Amino acid sequence: RAARRAGLFMIPEETVVPREIVETQQHVENAQEVPGFVDAVVDPVTNALMCATATARKIQ
């Protein structure tokens, strides 16, 4: 543990977080809530998106 605190045996990404990781985390924090079932029923745009991305089911 002392070696880790001193920064020994660490790769650069462990000492300084890359900009890409920081920006990705910011995008995740600023993302909107995922629409749910009620949203798909009430909002026509969400409904269209859910229908377009749904997978086809086999009829047996």
Image (spheres, helix red, strand yellow):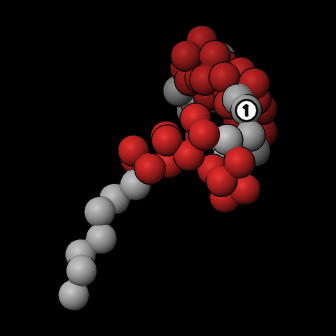
Q: Is residue 27 left or right of residue 57?
A: right
Q: Is residue 5 above or below residue 39?
A: above
User: Which residue is disc 1 drawn over?
Assistant: 32
Q: Is residue 20 visible?
A: yes
> Residue 34: horizontal and vertical position, in percent?
67, 44
> Residue 18: horizontal and vertical position, in percent?
58, 16
Which residue is painted at 34% across and 59% down in the image?
Answer: 55
Where's the N terminus, which quadrant?
top right
Q: Is residue 8 above or below residue 60?
A: above
> Residue 41: horizontal and vertical position, in percent?
65, 53
Q: Is residue 17 visible?
A: no
Which residue is painted at 63% across and 16% down in the image?
Answer: 23
Where's the C terminus, which quadrant?
bottom left
Around disc 1, counting alpha carbons within 10 Å, would you say few (fewer than 14), some (14 to 19), or many (20 or more)? few
Q: How many marks?
A: 1
* Residue at far bottom of view: 60
In this orientation, which residue lies closer to the viewer: 14 or 36? 36
Which residue is painted at 60% across and 12% down in the image?
Answer: 19
Three-letter amino acid code at the position of disc 1: Gln
* Residue at far top of view: 19
Q: Is residue 50 left or right of residue 41?
A: left
The image quarter containing residue 15 is top right
In this orientation, which residue lies closer to the viewer: 57 or 3? 57
> Residue 5: horizontal and vertical position, in percent?
77, 32
Q: Is residue 23 left or right of residue 48?
A: right
- Secondary element under disc 1, as helix, strand or loop, is loop
